[in-house]
Every structure is written in structure tokens, then in C-alpha cells.
Image (spheres, rainbow, N blue to C red):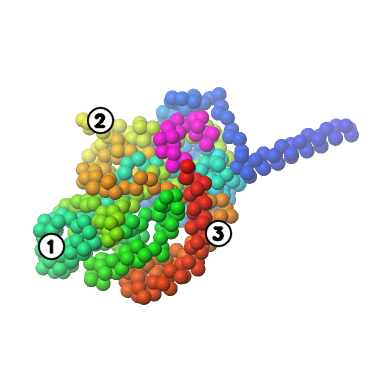
Amino acid sequence: MKKLLMLILSLALITIIFAGCSKSNKTNGESVSKGPSDNFNKEGLPIVDEEINLKFFARRSPVNGPYKDMSIFKEFEKMSNIKVEWNDVPQDGFDERKNLEYAAKKLPDAFFKAAISEAEAVKYGSSGLFIPLEDLLEEYAPNLTALFEQYPEIKSSITAPDGHIYALPAIVELDAARTEKFWVNKNWLDELELEEPTTPDELVDVLAAFKNDDPNGNGEQDEIPITERDLPTLINNMAGSWGLLQQLGNTINIENDKVHIWKTDDKYKDLLQFLNKLYKEGLLDRDVLSHSPSEYTAKLSTGKVGMSHIQADDMNTQYKDYEYIGIAPIEGPFGDRLVKASPIARDFGTFAITSANEYPAETIRWMDYFFSKEGSIMFRYGVEGETFNYDEDGLPEYTDEILNDERGTGAAIGEFSPYPGGGAPQYITEYNSSAINPPSVQEAQKKFDPYLPEVIYGAPLFDEKVNKEVNQIRQDMDAYYNESTSQFINGDKSFDEWDEYVSTIENLGLERLEEIYQEAYNSTFKE
């Protein structure tokens, strides 16, 4: 009995030790991914011979219908033999629900369109909640791997400081989907016999004519010469004409491999003085500092807007009695003419696999399909013959029922695909985007193409300690920067206070923040 008791205790101790090792491995982000089952096919379809079930936690945008009813997932279930049980949570209150999922004893198998932040990826990846994906990607995801090889900055921008990849982004090859074009009312230009502006002075002249010369012909001075969705859109899209870009997810320029945060730059001061001039003279919509997205959209539908920056063709679709055309960015006072663009690896944290997943190889193959040519078309257009067909040029196009849906095209697409509303794990190319890249957008982008930066670097992933320090600095600095920017533009803060503003930004940790971003750039992107 003693020997038997000792044997049982020894076995129990071994079990505890192995369990502890397993837990330790997961905690350090080094958990070994479970291998595929005999049911698994490494190539081709179906992915598995016998059906398996996966549970996905997802964000549902307002324009999306229930995921379980989406035809693309029903069709791919037949093709792959993988049935996904969706827990799709409405966007309002999603972050709170996501945090509950992180803390739950029973995790979903994957997070989908879940807006996983860089900090969350590092935190929950290093703790073992998310599993490392790099080996799975290399072994079972040929489409994503090929894109990583074609665009090395993608892999660099999603790799955590510990060397692991815990979440996938959307990948956007189409330049027109990465820029907010500068749209102008062509009818007003023609009515007033004006040319497209190319300099700040010419822009002022055009805006003044829009304001004062009644281009809409109603006898009232009700025109809005220029408006924007919000203050960041205004600043970030105008800043390129002053040589200021958005690198590393912040107000950063990179020149000769040196990181420069331009919040206190003299060029930025000059930009603010120009915007203050527009504001004082009534050329810039004064509500741009406060209106909501819905209020902005409502203004576009009135036909009273002369100019604005938008990615797609909203200016034309919102008010069809006018034609809006894209113009090139103006050349600023220092000879700069650049375009703000998103990185190719757009929308970080769209997809992650958890440690609860018994089928990680199968899951990564499921996701990788939608980064293939045919899979990306299905994701964006649905099922051929139902929601789209191919035109004579071989390009997919939505059916008339989708294009003419009384709810709007976005809502119609949102019934069969999760991509409307943004933030989905998707692959956007010129081939699969003809519907959102009509001739007007293509022409607008052609005017932007010469001024695109060679590369845009995404926000870096910091480890938890550094991320905490960055957040502490940026919380106060960004709040002060945003408030001061508004005040400089609307005149509440005099430019005589510029030196005080610069000193405050510096005292809030500007030098240390530049050091942190420089170290991140050196370790992540610098060859």
C-alpha cells in the first residue's frame, strides 16, 4: 500500500510539474501550436474532410447584419467543412464586451474584426491568451506569407518585441483605399471660371469666391467653402503641404532614419496660422472643431459644400446634382507637396487565435483563404450569381439589387459581408475594389500618386513597460496638443503664446517620446 501510495503521489507530482511547464510556456508567449489532425488538408479545399466547429467573437458594425446569416460564411462553410459559431457583438459597447471575453474562463477560438490594439496584442500574447502565429503562417498560410514577402514592412509592423506575431491586419494594396482625396465642386469652379488651386494663396482665392460669389445661385451666402469630418482629418490632410506626415501612428516625420515629432515644428506653426486665417475669414467651416460624423455627412447631402477630404466617392454620392473632382495637394509655402496615406498593413488587430483553439492550423487556413484573389473577391462581393457577377473586363461588379438598395449600398453589402464599417481582416486590391473605386476616385488618385511617400510605417508594438510609459506621456501631451490646436485655429490662443506652447509640450516629455519612437523604428523597420 505504501509503494502504491508513493507511486500515485509521484504521478500526481509529475502531472503538476508538466502542467506548470505548459502554463509557463504559454505565459512567455512560447506555447507550441497544436499540430493539425489527420482530418486536415494542408492544401486545397475542403480544409478538413470531416466538419469541425469553431467559435469566433466578432464586432458587428451598424451596417452589418448577423454574421451567421452572411452568405459568404455559409458558402465557405460548404467549401471548407469548417462551421463557425459567431458571437457577433454590436459596435456600441463592444470594447466592454471584449474585455469580458479576455477575462472569461472559456475563451472563443478566435477574435475577428475585434479592433485588438497593439497594447492588447502584446499583453495577451505574452500572457498566452493569444497564440503566436508566425510558424502557422509560414507553414499553412501561403497567401499571407507571399504578401509579407512582397511588403516586408507588413511583417515588421505586426511583430511584437518578443519576436512573435499575435494578430493580423487588413492588407491594402490599393493606394486609393489608403488616401483621403481632396475633392472640389467642379460645378462651382466652372460657374465662377476658376482653376484648381495649386498654392495656399490660390486656395484662399477659390474659397473666398465660393463664400462670396453665390456659386449655387440661390441668392444667399449659405455656401460652406471647405469642411472636414473632424479636426484630425483637417490637420493630417493639410499637413502634407507643409511637409508633415503621419509616420509610426503619430505626428512623426522620418528623415535620414531620424524620428522627428513635429508638434512644435515651425512648419506646424505656419500651418496653424494658415488655418487660423481660413477660420477668421469664414472660409473654413467653424463647426469642423465640434460637429459629429453624422452632422458632417448631413452637410455633404445639402450641396452647399465646396471642398473636403474623403477616401471614396461620398461627395458625388451624397449630392448627385453636382460633380466633385479630385485635385492634387497644394504646394505649401516651403515647397512641400505630400499626401497623407495609411500604411499597407492597415487596421491592426483584425484577427487573432486564442490558446483555447484546438484547431489552429485549420483556423489559419480558414483565414488565409480570404487573402487569396478568389477569397478576397468573395469577402467583398459575396457569392457569384447572387450578389455579384463579372463584367466584360473580368472584374466583379455588384448586382443592380445591391447597387440600388433603398437602404444604401453599404447596408446591402453588410447583409452578406462584414467588411462595411471597417476593421475587418481583408485584402484590398485594385481588382476587387472596382465598386468603391469608380472612375472619379481613380482620376482623383492619379493626381495624388506623384506625391505619395515611398513608404508609410505603421504604429510600432511596444512591450508592456514601454507602452505604459508611452501612454503616460501621450495622454497628457496629446490632450494639450489637441486643445491648443483648436485654440490656435479659432483664435482663442494667440500665436504670441507659441513659445509657451512649445515649452509645455517639451516639458510633457517630448524628448523622451522621440527616443522611444526612435528605438522602435531602429529595431522594427531600419535595415
The answer to whether residue 312 shows anywhere in this view is: no
Q: Which residues are magenta?
A: 134-156
Q: Which image quarter: residue 486?
A: bottom left
Q: Which residue is mark 2?
A: 394
Mark 2 secondary-structure assignment: loop
Is 269 drawn above or below residue 420 in the view shown? below
Magenta stretch, overall SS? helix
Residue drawn at x 27%, y 51% as measured from the top left: 181
Observer-nearest of 475 and 506: 506
In x, y percent, where is residue 465?
58, 55
Q: Amino acid at mark 2?
A: Gly
Q: Is residue 527 above or below residue 327?
A: above
Residue at the spot of label 1: 215
Answer yes or no: do the residues labelled 2 and 1 have beta carbons within 8 Å? no
Q: Report whether 23 appears left or right of 53.
A: right
Residue at 54 percent across and 34 percent down: it is 135
Residue under pointer 3: 469
Based on the picture, tell me whether residue 150 belongs to the magenta stretch.
yes
Badge 2 crowding class, 10 Å Cα cut-off, few under 14, some 14 to 19, many 20 or more, is few
